[in-house]
Image (cartoon, helix red, strand yellow):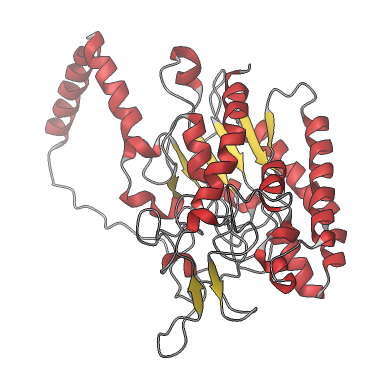
Amino acid sequence: MEHTNHRRRRGLRLPRQASPVVSTTSTTTTLLLLVICLAALTRTPAAAEALRKRGADEGDTGGGGGSGCDNKAGGKQPSPVWVFGDSYADTGNLGDLGRELTRAWYDPYGVTFPGRPTGRFSDGRVLTDFIASAMGVPTPVAYKLRRGAARGLMARGMNFAVGGAGVLDTGNFQRNIGAQIDLFQAHHPPPTRGCDAGVAVVVVSGNDYSYAADKDNSTSAAIAYIPAVVRQLREQLRRLRDEVGMRKVVVTNLHPMGCTPLFTRALNYTACDPLANAGAAQHNAALQSVLAALDPANRTFLLLDLSTPFTAFVVEDAPERFPEPRRPCCESFSGDGHCGQQDDGGRRQYTLCDDPSKHFYWDDVHPTQAAWAAVARTFRPKIHEFLLST
């Protein structure tokens, strides 16, 4: 899908604080008084509860906090939600490296919501926003934006998905899904016995196959890549359950990739590419078999079906809902251009529709906010049922 570069973030070294010189006796006395006062304070139930809530609210400024332990016991709050994936789920993790490489940080992206670019690959909200809403939680904070977020919000989950990522390496220099899980584990120790890490969402929209097709200039090469991708995806799903300790894992199947404007443009947006759609269907069948083997009782994994609603809107035609099912709202002048492209003089090299809600696709591969909202209406009941199951 989109091609991006990655900028390595340097770590920050905190200055060492100077320590005042005090006598050993004074230090010991002070510490003893502090321990006595703290012990007396925490004997008060109200004070102990206040301390517990304060710790939960503060969380970990490095990568969020929270687990499914308190939720299972008290049932007061939903489990934290952790998102892994690519541009269909990214809410701001792709750094701003300039318009050519990271177009989601430039106009016209975000024109519908919130009226400015936010790093989302759409005119507004994306899949993560709608999944979080279906789960009854705020949209998880993007990992890259964590330092500016409220600590209490970070305790409810975090989004590690980044545009250009794949299950395997895609040549876009972004963390693949395995590396995103590594990042999660670096900030979160395994849950204690009797607790869980929360709910994971894994979004895969086909970057691995785009990479394979581009490398060999062949859709057939992408289809041949399916076993390797699904095998690695299986390992990461197993890891989320068995090593990370996720209580529930939601994983998407592939949309009909041959119906994206990337393919339909050559057909004047009148039809889809059957070979690309066949490859997506083959991936979906393999993934369904993997989940059946991993979780025969369907207790841990939910296959979030994007293929069926996408097909209903862009293949079978639904002109009453999306008059333009295969033509993007933001269309580049040339086939090898992109939404948001400008020439050296700053002049637009794309056209923009008057009403994005009449289009299913925003750009050459990403749906509009209206499309995601329509798709979300098909999966909300399934997510509710899945989260309530034991």
Query: Which of the 4 image quarters holds residue 154?
Result: top left
Query: In the image, is 180 to the left or to the right of 40?
Result: right
Q: Who's the residue at 84% across and 43% down the image?
A: 286
Query: In the image, is 280 to the left or to the right of 306?
Result: right
Q: Who's the residue at 11% across and 32% down the image?
A: 26
Tell me the quarter of the image containing the C terminus: top right
Residue projecting furthest to the front: 320
Q: How many marks?
A: 0
| In front of the other: 348 or 52 | 348
Tell me the quarter of the image containing the N terminus: bottom right
Query: In the image, is 333 to the left or to the right of 293?
Result: left
Instruction: Residue 295 in the image: state x and y as whole percent.
Output: 77, 27
| In front of the other: 225 or 169 | 225
Instruction: Residue 128 in the image: state x and y as whole percent.
Output: 52, 44
| In front of the other: 72 or 320 | 320
Residue 203 sits above or below residue 365 on the image: above
Residue 381 sits above or below residue 169 on the image: above
Residue 106 sits above or below residue 70 on the image: below
Instruction: Residue 85 in the image: state x and y as whole percent.
Output: 60, 50
